[in-house]
Amino acid sequence: MPVPLLRVARPTDDLSALLHFYCDGLGLQVLTSFTAHNGFDGVMLGHPQAPYHFEFTHQPGHLVGRAPTLDNLVVFYLPDAAEWQAAVARMRATGFAPVPSYNPYWDQQGLTFEDPDGYRVVLQQAFWSL
């Protein structure tokens, strides 16, 4: 069975701030972008061969605000210690410091970073399995 493509989509008030966090910090790439498409500007980020991407949109004149809770997460499982350390170093080098996770479980094997909209990304140094 083919793996479905996952798109995580959400609005933002500041596309450029998210680009700094997700591209410069997390190392994602701009896959495509659009301007004034049905009243929205947007960008899709990910890795070209990955089965997921993030879509961030902005509607000029519309305020969306911050994340509704501190427990809105995206978790990246990075089991390789060197890969995890490199990801954490990249986040810190681009100016993003870890924050304490709302759920202390995520602090046991990972670090949590908050994006400019208040949504959180966990870099988990572990394998994920069912």
Image (cartoon, rainbow, N blue to C red):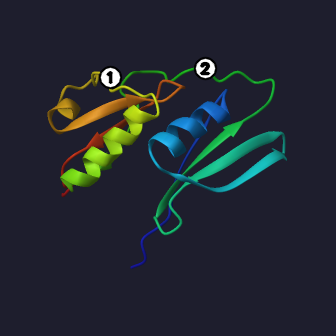
Badge 2: residue crowd in 10 Å (few <14, some 14–19, many ≥20) = few
Q: Nearer the viewer, residue 73 or 80?
A: 80
Q: Nearer the viewer, residue 72 or 122?
A: 122
| Quadrant in which the N terminus appears | bottom left
Give the residue displayed 67% in from the left and 47% down from the top.
Answer: 43
Give the residue displayed 48% in from the left and 30% down from the top.
Answer: 115
Q: Secondary structure at mark 2?
A: loop
Give the residue displayed 68% in from the left and 40% down from the top.
Answer: 57
Q: Is residue 76 above or below residue 94?
A: below
Q: Nearer the viewer, residue 129 or 22?
A: 22
* Pointer 1 with pointer 2, Cβ within 8 A: no
Name the residue tied to disc 2.
65
Say if residue 8 shows up in the picture. Answer: yes
Say if residue 78 shows up in the picture. Answer: no
**Residue 49 screen position, x and y as percent:** 49, 69
**Residue 55 screen position, x and y as percent:** 60, 47
Measure the C-alpha gap from mark 1 to mark 2.
20 Å
Name the residue tied to disc 1.
99
**Residue 66 screen position, x and y as percent:** 55, 21
